Image (cartoon, coloured by chain):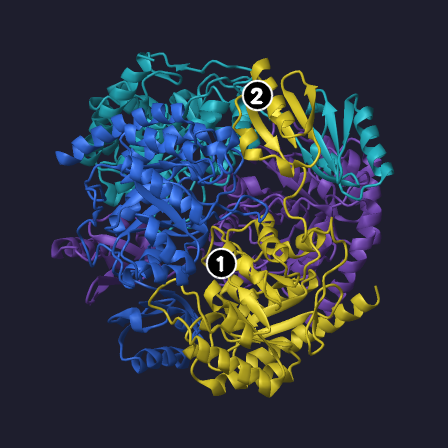
Chain colours: A cyan, B purple, C blue, D yellow
Amino acid sequence: MIIVMEHNATQEQLNRVLKYIEDRGMKSYIHKGDLLNVVAVIGNEINLNPENIAALEGVTAVKKVQEPYKLVSRVSHPEDTVINFPNGVKIGGLERPVLMVGPCSVEKDFDGLLQVAKAAKEMGCQFLRGGAFKPRTSPYDFQGLEEKGLQYLAQARQETGLLVVTEVMDTMDIPLLCQYADVLQVGARNMQNFKLLKALGRINKPVMIKRGPAATIKEFLLAAEYVVSNGNPNVILCERGVKGFDSQFSRNVLDIAAVPIIKKLSHLPVIVDPSHATGKRYLIEPMGKASLIAGAHGLMFEVHHDPDNAMCDGAQSLNIEQFKETTRVFNKLIGRIDYDNKNK
Amino acid sequence: MIIVMEHNATQEQLNRVLKYIEDRGMKSYIHKGDLLNVVAVIGNEINLNPENIAALEGVTAVKKVQEPYKLVSRVSHPEDTVINFPNGVKIGGLERPVLMVGPCSVEKDFDGLLQVAKAAKEMGCQFLRGGAFKPRTSPYDFQGLEEKGLQYLAQARQETGLLVVTEVMDTMDIPLLCQYADVLQVGARNMQNFKLLKALGRINKPVMIKRGPAATIKEFLLAAEYVVSNGNPNVILCERGVKGFDSQFSRNVLDIAAVPIIKKLSHLPVIVDPSHATGKRYLIEPMGKASLIAGAHGLMFEVHHDPDNAMCDGAQSLNIEQFKETTRVFNKLIGRIDYDNKNK
Amino acid sequence: MIIVMEHNATQEQLNRVLKYIEDRGMKSYIHKGDLLNVVAVIGNEINLNPENIAALEGVTAVKKVQEPYKLVSRVSHPEDTVINFPNGVKIGGLERPVLMVGPCSVEKDFDGLLQVAKAAKEMGCQFLRGGAFKPRTSPYDFQGLEEKGLQYLAQARQETGLLVVTEVMDTMDIPLLCQYADVLQVGARNMQNFKLLKALGRINKPVMIKRGPAATIKEFLLAAEYVVSNGNPNVILCERGVKGFDSQFSRNVLDIAAVPIIKKLSHLPVIVDPSHATGKRYLIEPMGKASLIAGAHGLMFEVHHDPDNAMCDGAQSLNIEQFKETTRVFNKLIGRIDYDNKNK
Amino acid sequence: MIIVMEHNATQEQLNRVLKYIEDRGMKSYIHKGDLLNVVAVIGNEINLNPENIAALEGVTAVKKVQEPYKLVSRVSHPEDTVINFPNGVKIGGLERPVLMVGPCSVEKDFDGLLQVAKAAKEMGCQFLRGGAFKPRTSPYDFQGLEEKGLQYLAQARQETGLLVVTEVMDTMDIPLLCQYADVLQVGARNMQNFKLLKALGRINKPVMIKRGPAATIKEFLLAAEYVVSNGNPNVILCERGVKGFDSQFSRNVLDIAAVPIIKKLSHLPVIVDPSHATGKRYLIEPMGKASLIAGAHGLMFEVHHDPDNAMCDGAQSLNIEQFKETTRVFNKLIGRIDYDNKNK
């Protein structure tokens, strides 16, 4: 930790900073500059609260040199985490990128869901996604089928062999969801619901965390750290766009650079959701391809058997025919990436 | 609802839009323009999903003319909501603006909390705030005293008569919090934790919702709508800064304009938290004054008996002496505003 | 144009709106809703100032249905613009994506520039970029070689046959730059320097406009409209990242979705600059590939013969060896895209 | 400057960093940490390019400890700058806050302008503002009366004694503007038009710089540094809102905290423009009051004799009656602030 003193800080103020550090069992070293004095703290800065130091009189800035996430960092764990599913599917590292598809929410028409699931299986996708509990901005929007929706997903899994990804919105629902789902998804709006993250650290199913629309990459990794530090190492990160100043043509700004950045900082798998990021059907293909070629370990996107009549997010869903066409494009690219990875 | 067709939309695409509207029991009217055709939908647009219409072929834009929030809107409820507490304190409308003060988190030193509470009482504040359950970005930071903290708050209330505001982080904790708190606060990170909001709609204590750091005003009002539409009309809104692109000198951008905007759109009381918004002690006074003069129904800010050693957010907390000095300034301004309100 | 009246607007206020429209030679139609009245204006809305209408009493919102850009829009000009250079290079449409490379600024070591230019030529790049006039955030940073820099670029062109792209910062410098450059670049900070844009509309060289860091896509297209409406149809758009809330790992957020969005709205060519967007050398390759596969008509990125000693932006520049390696990857992808385009 | 090495950096990489520093005549000191090594550079870091150091292999972060602005900083110039006008008006420090009012653009109806100017004089305002050269996002919007507009402003000054503030958009127009204006304003879109800033450093009239919509406070101060370092110490800063993610109810987010932050960092006067920040007439009064009480040295806002028919920005302009009412409120507050300042 580096502590920068104000240009007119007194010797007394400096001494107080030094004592503060010493009292906490750390050592420090002073650099006297022409304009500013700088105190370097030696040792593990975990024991120091930077905000409190910043509030000491005469201090103008505190700069941390260590990142606060540890278990999810490549510093402590250099090799890629690869998550293995019982049916042989793998996510992460140099494994073949995966596809997670399905409707935004599971609706009461089970046949529609099954059509999507069968098409997904046919096209080589590995995961069926669908919300049974739905976070909706307005209380007047459809809130999900709840347990009935989970049963539908489980039934579709039985008929196709696809793995099921679905969202958990509350700690109370975790036991129920664990009965039905293969991956529990934390929605973007719950990315910093720390009670939920802690509870998910104590289950033995993989957890997928979607990036909050205003979450920095550091905050995103710290959300994963909550799950991992509570005992669950199987976390998948999902980039899905950040809030920008222009939502006329795309709901959010898809931050594709987050993929190579996270892969440099962390060993966890990272996938991308181009449907939610853009809110536009025609952007799924170009943004999906861009994410894959930038190194994403998979894509999640929305498919509905009848998007015009979907209960939610029809505008960002492909119909089954469009889905097949788009997935043929993705599969071709995935094949090429997989070949390159295998021959690295 | 207004539906704008693409410049090269076909008659068939237009007909499909018209049929879509008709199938849902609504009427429409077509304006033929030189370049673009526009369809106006007549009736209550609640029955139409704008995203699905936007996804119909040939549609380039859908513009809603009604806002999705109803119960919290002045359209349906023109008079100000004033929340009354059993001890006679009121928030909202033209009532005297209130002050909510206390440490970020309740710590194991009860005497420190009591010092703050007594100073708050002495200075005429109405509420003691303090977190027993703490949302922390990092799992390695102090997570709160939990029930012990609630007991401390209740004890401080008993000794001072102040009302207690504390944060709820999980639906499971609501019954416990209702035993101790006078106002349950929803933190910024949980503003769209819809399960929590729904559950808070079913209690009979006032709820204070902090604005999410990337929440639009519409999303903020819809969060309140979740609580009100589930049965609890006593909601306080709290502006606490939004994410900006420059966090070098202030953690967030305090959006003071949200105060007059929300007061125009909604009848609910709205207060401001200048501590969390800025993260800087020296900004509490100017930003607090600016919020009050712009029409805030109150302020919430942090006071700690020993900020240098606070477990969290010391840098944005006043010590007791600074608190008294700042509150004298606020009280003078509050007196003037109250006088003007009473003589309106 | 659609004008939404407030729920409590008076008949008199409504009449005033209708008269306002009529006075400007337009017709209107009123939809009476349960809660709100809506006025639809029929005809070319160019004659109406939406801000003034929004300011009429009783009006709550004004929604435009036509976009303000015309000449750059596909509505008026459906075919792709392809810019042809005298040496046969083309940009836009289904032409082979181009590469523009070189140092951030031209420095006094001409041999270094020539090394870069020769490597660029060898790798099949079409353009040499380099700043002679440099916009620098701090007045104490290197401000460019000015005319001497232009002479160096011209000399490098003579030795390699590459086309020269360089930045124009002031209307006064346009004649000088036209003597030396093949493309005049408008920097992100000057994207709304309207005097400069108008003046560039009167030259007969292609102009490349970089997107401002806080410019919406509509504002970006309107900047191009300034140049085109003043007489110069040869405009290239360059996405280079927008300001976000997290600059710890990437300077800006590269908005790759802008590429397919702009290609849908406009016929102009659009390229991407992954160097400035991210500020990080290691992100040039993944973000460059992602941009190309999303449909960019080219890439611009920084190469320096000795990045450690570059006068500006060394951290985002490749050295010559890295450049060759990265360009081999890009060329392979460009070849595949070109093949697919030719076989569409 | 503090240089943080990667956790797996080699000794060779560390040595190269040390040599880089030594070659530039600086000294360094190494802190060996458990996980990371940190190099502290001793001396004036102006001689080092942090981006180049960041690009050296094995370096993970570079943290500057000195701010790049000097002349505008309180470090080098602790006393407030107060700008004196020939007619006795002063801006800055503890002087009475000023009011700058007038239409967005000067229009061909001179009488309308004169009505505004006379009302401004009557209400005790010091400055008449109005654009003769107008930066407009769309090339099809009114672009200003140019020299004719300047003549109108000068004539209104002659009849009222108000000082004239008007915008400069291009270096070529500076001599003309200096003939007519008392303060030359740099618009938000030109805040980083460095050629213009440099040229304004060479005139002997005060310059007012509006904050760019995506400019950090550091960038804003560096824009002022361009003017001051080129010889003109009389710079006024004007906060006018930054781009946010929610423009439904306010065009930009008015960053009032910038006022006390800038006053802490710099000695230059800082004023606020609530008209452009919000784009809404009804927000001028609350946001103006909030700005003044937070410490602004003045306000600039828009007044038009006939806002419904204004050529630009009618929605954010007050008519003359509203202006008088609002200014009475401002004057009362200014009187109180002035009294408090005089008695500090």
Tell me what residue is drawn at x 50 percent, y 17 percent.
A233
For the residue marked with disc 2, what is the amino acid?
Glu
Q: Is residue D131 left or right of residue C38?
A: right
Residue D190: image tag: 1
Q: Is residue A97 left or right of residue B124?
A: left
Whole-percent x, y for residue A113 in the image? 26, 31
Which mark lies nearer to you, 2 or 1? 1
The answer to which of A298 and D188 lies nearer the viewer is D188
User: Is residue A185 visible to us here?
Assistant: no
Q: Which quadrant does the C terminus of chain C fall into? A: top left
Farthest residue toward the right? A12
User: Is residue C251 visible to us here?
Assistant: yes
**Residues under numbered marks 2 and 1 in contact, where contact means CB atoms less than 8 Å apart:** no
Q: Examine the rendered structure and indicate whether residue D178 appears above or below residue A30.
A: below
Whole-percent x, y for residue B98 in the image? 71, 57
Secondary structure beneath dot 2 equals loop
Which of the two discs, 2 and 1, labels the residue nearer the N terminus? Answer: 2
Tell me what residue is drawn at x 51 percent, y 54 percent.
D194
Image-quadrant location for residue C50: bottom left
Disc tally is 2
Whole-percent x, y for residue D269 in the image? 67, 62
Chain for numbered disc 2 = D
Query: Which residue has dot 2 on it?
Result: D6
Secondary structure beneath dot 1 equals helix
For the residue marked with disc 1, what is the amino acid?
Asn
Using the numbered discs, state the Cα–Cα distance from disc 2 to disc 1 in whole angstroms.
Answer: 39 Å
Whole-percent x, y for residue B77 in the image? 51, 64
Label 1 Cα neighbours within 10 Å, binned few <14 / some 14-19 / many ≥20: many
The answer to which of D141 and B208 lies nearer the viewer is D141
Label 2 Cα neighbours within 10 Å, binned few <14 / some 14-19 / many ≥20: some
Q: Which quadrant does the N terminus of chain C fall into? A: bottom left
Chain for numbered disc 1 = D
